[in-house]
Amino acid sequence: MKSWDLRPSKAWGGWVFSCLAFCFFVLLISVPKKSHAQTRQAQGHEWWRHAVFYEIYPRSFADTNGDGIGDLNGITGKLDYLKALGVDAIWITPCYPSPQVDFGYDVSDYQNIDPMYGTLEDFDRLMSEARKRGIRIIMDLVINHTSDQHAWFKESRSSRDNPKRDWYVWRDGKGNQPPNNWLSTFGASAWKFDPTTGQWYYHFFYPQQPDLNWRNPQVEQAIFDVTRWWYRRGVAGFRLDAVDTLFEDPQLHDNPILPGKNRYGDPNMENRYNTKLPELHDVLQRLRQVADKHDAVLIGETWTKDVDELKQYYGGHSRELQLPMDFLFTTVNKLSPVEFRKQIAAVDGAGWPVYVLSNHDIVRSYVRYGDGQHNDAIAKLMAALYLTLRGTPIMYYGEEIGMTNNDPKRKQDVKDPIGNLGWPLEKGRDGERTPMQWNPLPNAGFSTGTPWLPLAPNYKTHNVESQLKDPDSILNVYKQLLALRHTNQALADGEYVALAEEDPNVLAYLRRYQSEAVLVILNMSPSVQKRSLNLTPQGFSASESTTLLTTLKTRPGTLPLDSFTLEPFAVYIGSIKK
Ligand code: NOJ
Ligand code: CA
């Protein structure tokens, strides 16, 4: 019998009434006010389409116990900040127990929290505080590999006939050489010899990250159970790490060698037989079936070479990942309207787009696009671009205040092992993982101890406290953009319509929704640009646009479309009606 089948008898009807009244009162005070995203969900849209996601690298967000490493309580303490910013969901990179060889991407227990980040109780408190604010939590699921310290691998390596032997990829070598020529993406052979059993195991990443064998159904069962366990704890989905590399060719064909060498001094290689094997899509579709039972979202770390590959991750009839990340967008490294237009059009046609500017593996967008002179204006311009496109944006912590990279200057300062392996060509990823800049005080308010990484040099000017006071700051532009996204129907649901498609300096487009549209005009050049726009072919005869948000100095209330002037890197966003 289900709980809603219970019928109260007359004798205890009064008691039931009092209980119901009390529950109603509790609900009234504890249910968060519905966000616009939730309201739209009621209209039949899945919640993740209109949610703004925010990636938190927990080591670097906020430290509450003074050990120089951020923690879960630190995140809980900043939920009000995130709510005020306009964030709907946070993705926390791995905070599970881990030897931290790859700073958490080497998981030694999927169902716990590493003591350096707190406890499961801290996690539950974070979850309930986030829920009160209408913020969802997404965990990082590392499914390609575990840590070599995971109990599964310890068992697997203990003997050739251990029941978990086949949970990982073990092979005989060729004499004293590895089984084939595959290379780790972090340098050198992807095979490590294990003297205990005289065989080699496969690791696409560090040797301390042995690959799981996804051809073994028990592996699938175990990982799917992990997801169910976190769903029951309240998580709203997962960001799936390294999904491209789940399967390997069982025949172990050698990969083709390409001309030249990579940053580790290894020959360049086409990873034809150990990445993007078709079998991985079957796994992702089954993982999606589990997610669907929990109204959860799956975000993919999908490094695709083109949009056709990206499309495969959505799966036919959208039965695979709801949000495969479009990293192709991050490969447009210069402010080129032509390149962005091409990329946006391609992804817009592939499925529901997912826009990312940077993350813990990619140089911060402030540096990638900045010209050294107009960096703040460019940061606002990039925000205006990816927060007004049709799709789901995933922000990276600190992007909203213009955090910059702080790459190590000396090899001995490097923390990320790939920086050591590849120095000096590969300096590692420390630069984009520096502590969040909360205020202009020592350690930027991140920690009372010594931060695990030195702060980026711009923390005295680019920090939350200072930027909250400045109405023109990058942070306030982000807040306005996010508020607009959450309230403007055309920005949420309107189609993307490219304008002036040949323009080499100004990127302009509409988000058209029924009889209205949002007009976005972005001057991607360092010079003043004069333009006019005729929107009759797009169905709008209006001669002017009503300003919603702009960085133009004159702050015009309306923009005449037959002639307007854009300052360098200016942003203009307006509303037009038919
Ligand atoms: C992708 C993660 O984003 C990266 O930080 C990590 O090193 C690799 N996957 C291996 O898990
Ligand atoms: Ca700490």
Image: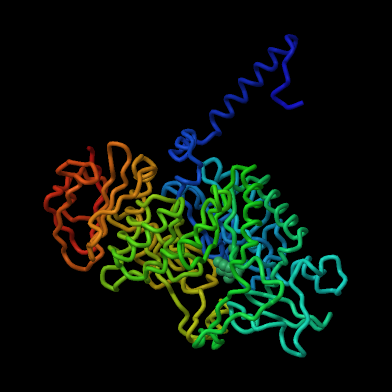
User: Residue 28 sits in which quadrant?
Assistant: top right
* Residue at the far left in the pictured view: 563
User: Residue 442 sits in which quadrant?
Assistant: bottom left
Q: Is residue 537 something one can see in this rendering?
A: yes
Image position, residue 198 (x, y; %): 82, 83
* Residue at the far bottom in the pictured view: 176
Display colour scheme:
rainbow
Q: Quick one: 527 or 411, which is closer to the camera?
A: 527
Residue at 63% from the left image edge and 45% from the top image edge: 234
Residue at 23% from the left image edge and 59% from the top image edge: 570
Image position, residue 449 (x, y; %): 54, 68
Image position, residue 331 (x, y; %): 41, 69
274 horizontally vs 111: left or right: left
336 horizontally vs 183: left or right: left
* Residue at the far top in the pictured view: 10
Image position, residue 108 (x, y; %): 71, 65
Question: Could you tell me how many numbered marks the image carries?
Answer: 0
Q: Quick one: 160 or 452, which is closer to the camera?
A: 160
